[in-house]
């Protein structure tokens, strides 16, 4: 890259550009030019002569931009007629929109009181959106009871399959391991008193009343609740939900209600299956570690369990199914229109569902204890 300067009699400083300007060779310095512009009297114009200019890239534009900025600060006119057409256009485009004065301004952290106020307002808005969503879900359920809900039966059948049959492998694994853990923990203590047989009672009652429903709900929150949030969030990004509203179709009826029905119908059945797998897991520990015969273990489990032992777990399973479906659909409907927001809504759906499951389980356990179930 070659640079030469020539000051003419008409008070014009001519910049001669030659050679190849490649960014691989580095950027040209403007120190010499700045010295010339600092000498008095200042030139009235700066012009260019680029007859010997070879190949060029962004390094030439960077040099010309710095030159133009320096001339602008000294009120010197820059004449770009001598530059190649492409260079002149790019230089004009670079200087067409001035830099925002506050573009590089450092952001200051808001005061504590301001941040607390914003957090309170955001929490209030989130509670309001949740209550509105719950109200719309109740209205859709009332429409279903009256036979006026608008959704496709094929969608419900597909969701029943996704929430039911396709969830059996993971529910089987988790429930079996939970039963193994409960039996092993109980065996460590009961073996001290020679009461190993009561491991069957411990595992059966724990799975039927509590662990079957809770573990199934947590698994479905991570598996299905996140899927619901991602599906609805993607539809929100693609403006499919807006299209449904434009056609006069309620998204609550068409999208949320089938998902809620699928989980409410499938979670109690999965809960019963989880109870069975947990009892099988406890039986493996009882037979392998405690030398209890399979028939003896089975008879003890049947003697310990009654129909009423399964009622609390099934009621909790229904409640958990509603909470998981509502959490996933709520976060999906609240999703913003970006790819990252879809991931955030799926994560938020899982967290919301698990918190709701734990809180509701504690409340229901206290209620069942009070009424003697």
Image: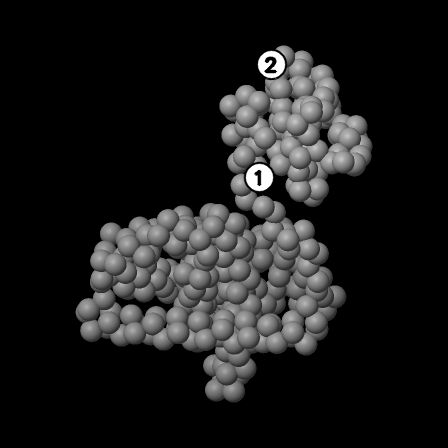
Sort mark 1 into few (<14), some (14-19) or many (20+) by Cα contacts within 10 Å.
few
Image spot of residue 101 (x, y percent): 64, 53
Q: Is residue 89 visible?
A: yes
Q: Quadrant of the N terminus?
A: top right
Could you tell whether 343 is left or right of 132 in the image?
right
Foreground residue among 287 and 157: 157
Determine the residue located farthest toward the bottom in the rendered image: 370
Q: Answer with the quarter of the image where residue 15 lies.
A: top right
Check the image and report above or below for 175 versus 312: above
Q: Residue at x 55, y 68 (%)?
A: 355
Q: Which residue is mark 2?
A: 51
Foreground residue among 305 and 131: 131
Check the image and report above or below for 95 versus 27: below
Image spot of residue 28 (x, y percent): 73, 25
Check the image and report above or below for 251 versus 40: below
Image spot of residue 360 (x, y percent): 51, 74
Foreground residue among 152 and 318: 152
CB contact under 8 Å: marks 2 and 1: no
Sort mark 2 into few (<14), some (14-19) or many (20+) by Cα contacts within 10 Å.
few
Q: Which residue is mark 1?
A: 95
Q: Residue at x 53, y 79 (%)?
A: 363
């Amino acid at each position: 890259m070659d640079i030469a300067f020539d000051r003419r009699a008409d008070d014009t400083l001519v910049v001669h550009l030659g050679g190849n300007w490649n960014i691989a060779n580095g950027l040209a310095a403007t120190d010499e030019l700045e010295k010339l512009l600092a000498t008095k009297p200042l030139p009235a114009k700066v012009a260019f002569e680029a007859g010997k200019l070879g190949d060029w890239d962004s390094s030439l534009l960077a040099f010309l931009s710095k030159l133009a900025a320096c001339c602008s600060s000294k009120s010197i006119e820059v004449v770009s007629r001598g530059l190649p057409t492409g260079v002149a256009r790019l230089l004009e485009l670079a200087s067409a929109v001035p830099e925002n004065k506050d573009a590089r301004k450092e952001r200051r952290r808001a005061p504590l009181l301001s941040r607390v106020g914003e957090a309170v307002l955001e929490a209030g808005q989130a509670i309001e959106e949740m209550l509105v969503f719950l109200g719309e879900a109740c209205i859709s359920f009332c429409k279903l009871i009256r036979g006026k809900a608008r959704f496709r039966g094929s969608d419900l059948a597909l969701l029943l399959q996704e929430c039911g049959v396709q969830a059996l492998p993971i529910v089987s694994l988790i429930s079996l391991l939970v039963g193994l853990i409960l039996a092993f923990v109980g065996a460590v203590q009961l073996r001290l008193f020679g009461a190993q047989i009561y491991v069957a009672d411990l595992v059966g009652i724990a799975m039927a009343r509590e662990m079957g429903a809770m573990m199934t709900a947590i698994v479905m929150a991570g598996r299905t609740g996140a899927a619901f949030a991602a599906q609805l969030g993607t539809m929100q990004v693609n403006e499919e939900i807006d299209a449904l509203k434009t056609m006069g179709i309620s998204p609550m009826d068409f999208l949320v209600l089938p998902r809620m029905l699928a989980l409410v119908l499938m979670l109690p059945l999965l809960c019963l299956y989880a109870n069975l797998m947990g009892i099988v897991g406890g039986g493996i520990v009882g037979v392998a570690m405690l030398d209890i015969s399979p028939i003896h273990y089975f008879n003890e489990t049947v003697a310990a369990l009654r129909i009423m032992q399964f009622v609390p777990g099934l009621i909790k399973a229904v409640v958990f199914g509603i909470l998981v479906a509502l959490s996933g659909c709520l976060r999906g409907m609240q999703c913003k229109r970006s790819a990252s927001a879809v991931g955030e809504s799926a994560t938020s759906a899982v967290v919301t569902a698990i918190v709701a499951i734990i809180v509701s389980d504690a409340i229901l356990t206290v209620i069942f204890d009070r009424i003697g179930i």
